[in-house]
Amino acid sequence: MNNYAHGSIACVIVLLISLPALAAPKFTKGTAVAGVIAFQDDSDPAQFFWVPGRVDLALGTNLKAFKTQYWGIGPVHWAQDSTGAIYSIVGAILAGSANLDITDAQRNALIGEIKKAYGIPNAKLLPLALKNVKVTPILDAQTLSLGNKDVTLSFPSTYQFGTDLVYSIGTGNSLFAQVVAARDASDTAITPNPTFGLSIVGDAEFAGDPWTAEVTCDLSQVWEQTRTRVSASVSLGWFRIGSADYANTVQDLQKSGACKFDMKEGSLDNEKYGRQIFDMVKKIYEEINKKATDGDGFFKFEPNPQAGDPGGGGASSWWPWSVSINGGYSHAYFKQSISYHNTVSYTGHFLYTMAASMVLAVNCNNATSSHFVDLGDASQPCINQQKIDTFNARMKCEAAAKQPKLLQLEERLALNEITQTQYDRLLALYNRLSFCETVSSPNMELTNAVKSLKSFGVQQISEDKLREFEIRALR
């Protein structure tokens, strides 16, 4: 039975993390410039700890060696599972050694910004240490491993920027349909020489000034209000929430009555307490994510590779996350009120999740092509314009075939023909099922499958086959 049929659901979370009173970077004393964020030490005003929003790597300098293998970017790349079923897949493997350090230009820009902001002429810089590190591979500037359990990693669980490491990262065999579903709906095309890299998320210890908020929200109203900001007519892909919109979220939620923020310490001043406020909204969105019974959730937070660019200004220049909303869920998804109460405190010492993104491969050209291998086209290691045009056309075909079905799915939910749990399962099915690149017979040999589907889209999934998959998913 649908969980929401029972009415309001109360969720109470208390976040009060207390750690020993040792020296630590101060949460409210930070500055950002040239892609680097730095925090002042709470006991030594001249000491700053930096974390890169992005790392600009140079082959032979801080990118000491690398090798990249990829497949499925360009023509269709097929794989067969143990049942004999054949799927269109995309993926990559990256391996090499690097020193994830900021450049001399970034270091000089940061020292100059600290002198300007704090009046300290010769700031001491140390890299921020992270623990509980989680790594996700990136290809084409967007993660291809979303929801995929086959990612393989060789990367330390604790890491301090500025030290050498040997890495090996594999995206696994992401289904082509999952790649399309995970893309930014406003930027569906890819360009030559896409980014090969990784995102890093880890916990750092901070010292904070007194700031405590008691938050009470109706999560169904929060979702409806946030979802209506993006196109209501599109149901495929993710939509990026702009930094200005995100900065105004608390004020908008408070004005609409979706949330109440009772400040025990501190205030809701974005200019002064932006980090605390932004992270508080992130916790609200993450709580909404827990309401999805299947699929990738309602919101996605990814390391922002442009964090702290010069001239960025505002409270968002140091915000290390880009925020996206899943267009697959309609604004009217929740039928019942969902009560949420949370006490959020950034007082004393606490752990805070930081994020960064790194490029781990240089552009592919005549001088560097030996570092790249296309498993589907050995004659051309680089991702050139022909491969890009093919891949973009494949994504366009997939989106055009799937969009009407997703809108029909929303209508079925609105008419109460399916429950929210069934909607979640069918949405997850659509997102992992290719509508344009499908082999209907699981007994067909792989070589014959490739021959019969040499050009994509000639064998789209049939209505009968789709109904069969739906029945199986709902079971």
Image (cartoon, rainbow, N blue to C red):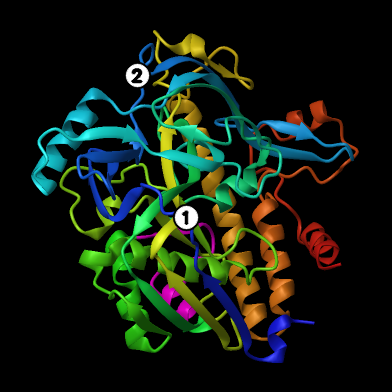
The answer to which of 104 and 139 lies nearer the viewer is 104
Disc 2 and disc 1: Cα gap in Å? 27 Å
Mark 2 touches mark 1? (CB < 8 Å):
no
Q: Tell me the residue at 52%/81% (across/down).
A: 341
> In the image, is residue 369 above or below residue 258?
above
**Which secondary structure, mark 1?**
strand
| Residue 375 drawn at (x, y percent) | 63, 20
**Residue occupying the point 24% across, 43% down:** 44
Q: Quadrant of the N terminus?
A: bottom right
Categorize mark 1 by other alpha carbons within 10 Å: few (<14), some (14-19), many (20+).
Answer: some
Part of the protein shown in magenta:
222-241
Q: Is residue 183 magenta?
A: no
- Left or right side of 216 for 88: right
Q: Is residue 363 visible?
A: yes
Q: Which mark is residue 87?
A: none
Which mark identifies residue 58?
2
Specify which label sits upstream in the sequence, 2 or 1: 2
In the image, residue 326 lies at what x, y percent? 52, 63
Residue in the image at 87% along x and 42% along y: 442
Q: Can you identify the residue that label 1 sits on? A: 301
